Image: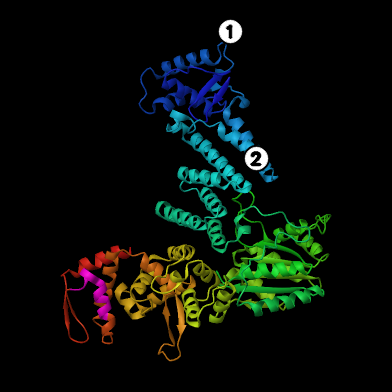
Amino acid sequence: MWYGMLGPVVVRHGRTSLDLGPRQRRLLLTRLLIEDGRPVSLTELCHSLWGDEQPTAAVSSIRAHISRLRSVLDPDRKSRSSVLISGAAGYALAVPREARDTTTFEAHVLRARDAFAREQLPLARAEIDTALGLWRGPALGEAAEEPFALREGARLNAARQDAGELLAAILVAQGDLVPAVSVAEQLTVGAPLREVSWSLLMRALYAAGRPVEALRQYDRFRTTLARELGLDPSPGLRDLHIAILRHDTAALGLPRSPRTPTTLSGVPPVPRTPLVGRSQETARLQTLLGEATAGQSRWAVVSGEPGSGRTRLLDEFAAQAAKAGFAVTRASGGHALGRDRAVTLRCAVTQLADGLCGSGEDSGAQEGPGEDILTTLVRKIARVPTLCVIDDLDWATSDVHHQLCRLARLLRNVPVMVVCALDDTQSPAVSGLLAELARRDTAWLRLGALSTDDVAALLAARGEPASPAESAELRRRSEGNPFVLGELLKLSPPQRTGPRALVPDAVRSTVQARLADLPAPARTMLTYAAVDGGRLDIALLAGVQRLTHEQILRQVDDSASRRLVVWDADSAAPAGGHYRLPDLVHDVLNDSLVTSSRHLLHSAIVRELIGRKDTDPDRLAGHLRAAGPMAPAAVAGPTGRTRSGAPRHPASRDTAEARAIG
């Protein structure tokens, strides 16, 4: 006999499906199958079939169904049944595990995972296809919604989802990207809140050359998660999103070409576009590398805002170090997706040691008796000139910081250079490590914004010479951020600046993700600033939101920490400068507004401006025009002139504005 639970419950003898009788009898069989040989009392069986509305003959009915099932499942019995057995504890179904399709399914999945881990992709694909081919529909069929079957049905369906995710990962690894995307899309439809499925879809789309769609899927999932559960994506998925924005294929876990025997996996291919605006940093790193070649351990810390080109600089430097004869290995302090596509990266120090094991430099460098991973790493490093690159240090755990502090103390007078990269906004957790590195004569390199000359040099290298005015406008619109500039340059020239300028999709997704991380009042403040031209008028924003200046400034601080607001210094200004929205942030906020919301926001600003003595008449007139039908009924401007409009009650205006900015 063969028992199937991966779909409607069936029992087969050879190739023949047995007649299991009416629905109540089939539910009884399912109830016993779920227990996997454990006895179920008559009371439990009655409750499973009828709940609290049991007929008076429930027990007799159960016994009659049991008798019929015995005749079907054990037709050759001559005395007591050896399949459907009874005892003091109740009834039990004695079915060998190998006679269940669930056991066969789990065995094939296990073999597929093992083959995938050993990079035997054809075998892994064959095993997972066989496993998924056993499914005939949702687990347990008609019994799936019965209370007694909910837990087992959920377990089996989750196992099917796991297997589907493994299939998608195998397809991506094989380069079968069209079916990989199709499988991943089906997975997200079946489990819209399951993060692993969305990460696979994002990775498959990126590998298929569709990065913009991958970023849109991240936004879809983030929105769904916030709406349904009030949660944000995990750090792992946020890191995947950033990796797509950076085109960081290593962090994406995509297939890479085999490593050459002279370098490690930490050496990426160098992009063709030249690295501009980083000549001083490159020269400093080269000097440190020369000192490391002479046997002096050297440390460097490279910091910069997201998109500042840290990873690109480290890629270039790693390639140069490899050419100089250094073994190069890389690690990340954050989360990434490894071979099983959904695991947290191990300790950065362990990654470095594993990378060195793969270099071929020291095939016998296993840990000695009583030797920890850190001592092993130091012993390996001492044997060959080595460059260790640790990215996203600010995401690392305190354990990683502690081990790196130990590493800094242990590495003395050996040919090694360690470069750590982190965000400009340093978390307090990393301060202890940075203090330790400061005592080691560490070089500190901060990547600032590109200059107008840098932008011009990049355009010239691309064969697109531009006028100083065009270079300056691109620099202004990108804020000198290399990532943003690169995305702008993917657009056609008329779409980069001027009246037809667009926001690149990747940049829009980044801005929207940062906005989503803000508290709602801060988003409201930024929306008002956007419709007011982008410059933050603290007094105006406090007035329209009915907040104090201090509360508005706290919102500004939150926004500035996410790079949604910048400070323009101006020594001639009374306050020494002003806050403003970056150009692309301003555009994203404006683009998100529907016409009616825009009218309400301008109307609120008008009512605030008319009470100020220093209101610019042109500014007030602009907001009056933009308020459209929502303009206040009568506005006496600074000039004494009056404008008439459609009357509205103030209370209804306040309510409508609150709805508009949500």
Viewer-closest of 402 and 389:
389
Question: Where does residue 172 sit, x and y in percent of width and height?
Answer: 59, 48
Question: Where does residue 290 sit, x and y in percent of width and height?
Answer: 77, 76
Residue in view at x 61 percent, y 45 percent:
170
Viewer-closest of 549 and 447:
447
Above or below — where is 160 with respect to 248?
above
Q: Quadrant of residue 65?
A: top left
Q: Quadrant of residue 53?
A: top left
On-image quarter of the N terminus? top right
Q: Residues within 10 Å of mark 1 (few under 14, many from 20)?
A: few
Dot in front, 2 or 1: 2
Viewer-closest of 530 and 173:
173
Above or below — where is 573 with respect to 342?
below
Q: Which residue is mark 2?
A: 124
Q: Which residue is mark 1?
A: 78
Disc 2 on helix, strand or loop?
helix
Q: Which mark is residue 508?
A: none
Question: Where does residue 657 sit, x and y in percent of width and height?
Answer: 27, 67
Question: Which residue appears farthest toward the top when viewing the image?
Answer: 78
Residue in view at x 30 percent, y 74 percent:
544
Q: Sequence-wise, which precedes: disc 2 or disc 1?
A: 1
Residue range in magenta is: 620-632
Q: Quadrant of residue 599?
A: bottom left
Q: Residue 49, can we see it?
A: yes
Disc 1 on helix, strand or loop?
loop
Is 190 situated left or right of 236 in this image? Answer: left
Residue in view at x 55 percent, y 41 percent:
164
Is 578 situated left or right of 16 in this image? Answer: left
Residue type (three-letter) at the residue carrying disc 2: Ala
Prevalent SS, magenta region: helix
